[in-house]
Image (tube, rainbow, N blue to C red):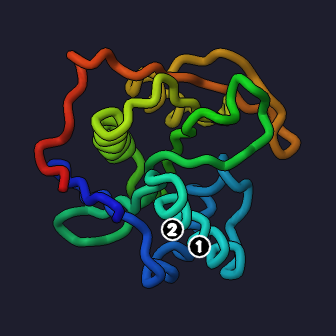
Amino acid sequence: MTPEIETERLRLRGHRIDDFERSCALTSDPVAVHFIFQKPLTREEVWGRLHRLVGHWTLLDYGLFVVEERTTGRMIGEVGLADFRRGLGGDFDGCPEFAWMLASDAHGKGYATEAARAALAWMEGRFAPPRTVCIIDPANIASLRVAEKLGFKPYGEAEYKDKTVLKLERFCAPAGDRSTPANSR
């Protein structure tokens, strides 16, 4: 079962099939997907993606969370861990990959950092992988700032889908430094 995590402003929960229309809205936001998919996704692509995201929780016991505003219940993005099998090499593949995406009207409010910190705290409290990785387009300055706040450090570059991306890594906090959000269920 997918956990539900609450922060001061956000709720993180697993994807459900009834998230399809909201997922279509998120992945058709050209600003939200620009650095991730380069173009909005079709409804067919969103349907397949939604099934993969639900499947992560079933197969791996982790995955991406839906990020909702607590006050409105509105889906504003996704954050969490995945195994995308990108083929980026032994220093990347095989490690849990951290990812986040927010709707353009949710940018600049600190939501990405708030949601990511809660997801990372849950992850470290649950199974503490020694190392987590992510990729970011070097032009995505906002995501690079979020990654820095989360403790990710660049360690190389890769070619992915015909463009250069930065590979970043984060090491799990020592056991004494871990904290799990108080409202995690």
Q: Count neighbours of disc 1 (C-alpha within 10 A) and say few if under 14, some if 14 to 19, many if 20 or more.
A: some
Left/right of residue 34 with respect to residue 69 in the rendered view: right
- Report if the CB atoms under discs 1 and 2 are less than 8 Å apart: yes
Q: Quadrant of residue 69?
A: bottom left
Q: Secondary structure at mark 2?
A: helix
Residue 68 versus residue 47 in the image, above or below:
above
Residue 182 versus residue 168 in the image, above or below:
below
Residue at 66% x, 81% y is 43
Coordinates of residue 58 in the picture (x, y in percent):
49, 64
Left/right of residue 10 with respect to residue 41 in the rendered view: left
Left/right of residue 97 with respect to residue 118 in the rendered view: right
Q: Count neighbours of disc 2 (C-alpha within 10 A) and say few if under 14, some if 14 to 19, many if 20 or more.
A: some
Residue at label 2? 54
Residue 164 versus residue 108 in the image, above or below:
above
Q: Secondary structure at mark 1?
A: helix
The C terminus lies in quadrant:
bottom left
Amino acid type, label 2 = Val
The N terminus lies in quadrant:
bottom left
Residue at label 1? 51
Name the residue nearer the viewer: 152 or 89.
89
Amino acid type, label 1 = His
Coordinates of residue 91 in the picture (x, y in percent):
70, 23
Q: Residue furthest right?
A: 162
Coordinates of residue 57 in the picture (x, y in percent):
47, 60
